[in-house]
Image: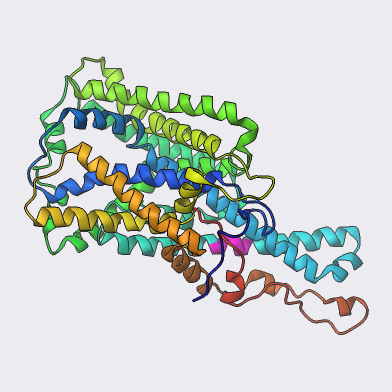
Amino acid sequence: MDTVNLSSRSYTSFTGPHSPRYPAPDVARGFMLLLIALANVPFWTALWTEAPEPTAIGTVWESVRGALVDQRSYPLFAMLFGFGLVVMARRRVEHDVDSVLEANRAYHDSLPEEGRAAFVAAVREAATVDARKMVRRRGLWMVLFGVVHSLFFSGDIIGAYGLIAVIFAGTFVRRRKVTMWVVSLLVILISAVLLGWSSRLLLGGPSEALDAATDPTAASPMAFMSSPWYPLIGLYMWLIATPMTVLTSMALPASFLGAWIAGTDLLTHPERRRGTLIVGGLAGLAVATLTWASLDALLDGAQMPVWAIVLVGPATTIVGGLAGACGWLALLAAFAGGARADGEPLTGVRWLLAAVGKRSMTAYLSQTVCFGLLYGGLAMSGAKAPDTALMALSAVVVWGLVAGLCAWLERAGRRGPFERLLRAAVARSARRSRLSELAVPSAGAVAGAPTEPSAAVPDSPAGRAEVSQPRPM
């Protein structure tokens, strides 16, 4: 079995094989998966028909989760995804351009200045097209991964981000800012209207409709989790939820925000702005908490004017969601710091979080397996439904077990199995490179020798796979 000794070398970079890698994105992904576990674990209460007994600590935790986890973790997921796509595409383009120019240096140097510029532009355009195709292939495979995952967990999010990559591959690769702004504002508007309408239902205090919607004993698609038909039901729910997530949630705007961050030094050199990141991070989490407090008060029966009620939903999900995600990302970047000048690897908690972050898809899918085995076994044994605090504790334990697996893989110098699978699938599904269509005279042709195309970039999937791809998940 081929392995890559990742732990013994310096933390490799997004920008080249011999440059230090910036740890902040991986550290943030690792912590993000803890937030995802805390956000996802309530899903499994649907295995029970009776509601758990409320507890004081459970009530406190629900408030903390609402303020800092729910609708905050997935925008963080999306920002890191968008950041990763842009960095991956940029690195791919630069690698391919450098490879072609190096292989055809004599021909390039023989051209007049205008000819050199035209040649470089043609190579860069071909490399950009190849990068766009790579991002789209990656997205298609992520959608397929999401289909399979939905058979076990209908709340899968991999498919939604894969769909974003498929539809907006060119937007990410070429960083079309106008398109990002227009699409983001449109999605935010749609989301605000839907959330405002939902908040309007709360006029006069909590309604019977709201009580029914939050009653775990009420008839809902989740009640079919114990049915042998659940895999098909989960897939059906996923097929509806995935495009709706792209159209109405903050996944797409947050992904575009991550693409913008990729053009800054906020994650590549957070040590330059550590104070600003800490202050901004705390402010973002404060905004997230305040917006949740308004919704919590409304759910508790607080009287508010109509306009305030209509704004509660959009404020909590849109403003609070994006602010909370940005707050977490800023604090995590400040905690991770920049690449070390001496090339030393990370240590301690940073090392553990980065080990998880570099295997985020494996960690995410492993959490579903652990939760399914744990709560499926409890439900089948006749145990009572656990309260929210106990479920939160189980989420931390599950994340810890998965982190242990990732740490073992890091020590062994191995990528996560699902990262390997996705990487291989993307590489093997590649078609002929656009760069190979450039019939560039070889160095011999410049000196009068017969003209032959230069094989600057390998066309085979195996050759293309050698271009390292940062993991946007």
Q: Quadrant of residue 340?
A: top right
- Residue appearing at x 54%, y 51% in the figure: 84
- Residue appearing at x 46%, y 47% in the figure: 353
**Is 109 rendered above or below residue 320?**
below
Q: For this rendering, which residue is in front, 431 or 464?
A: 464
- In the figure, is residue 296 to the left or right of 315? left
Q: For this rendering, which residue is in front, 217 or 383?
A: 383
Which residue range is magenta in the image? 129-134
Please indicate, yes or no, whether residue 171 appears anywhere in the rendered image: no
Please indicate, yes or no, whether residue 273 appears anywhere in the rendered image: yes
- In the figure, is residue 296 to the left or right of 34? left
Instruction: Determine if the magenta segment contains residue 237.
Output: no
For this orientation, the residue located farthest to the right is 447
- In the figure, is residue 155 to the left or right of 375? right
Pinpoint residue 266: horizontal percent, then vertical percent: 60, 37
**Is 422 rendered above or below residue 179?**
below
Question: What is the number of callouts on the image?
Answer: 0
Pinpoint residue 319: horizontal percent, then vertical percent: 41, 29
Pinpoint residue 376: horizontal percent, then vertical percent: 16, 56
**Is 186 rendered above or below residue 449?**
above
Q: Main secondary structure of the magenta part?
A: helix
Q: For this rendering, which residue is in front, 386 or 170?
A: 386
Which coloring applies here? rainbow
- In the figure, is residue 258 to the left or right of 56? right
- Residue appearing at x 8%, y 43% in the figure: 217
- Residue appearing at x 57%, y 70% in the figure: 465
Pinpoint residue 225: horizontal percent, then vertical percent: 15, 55
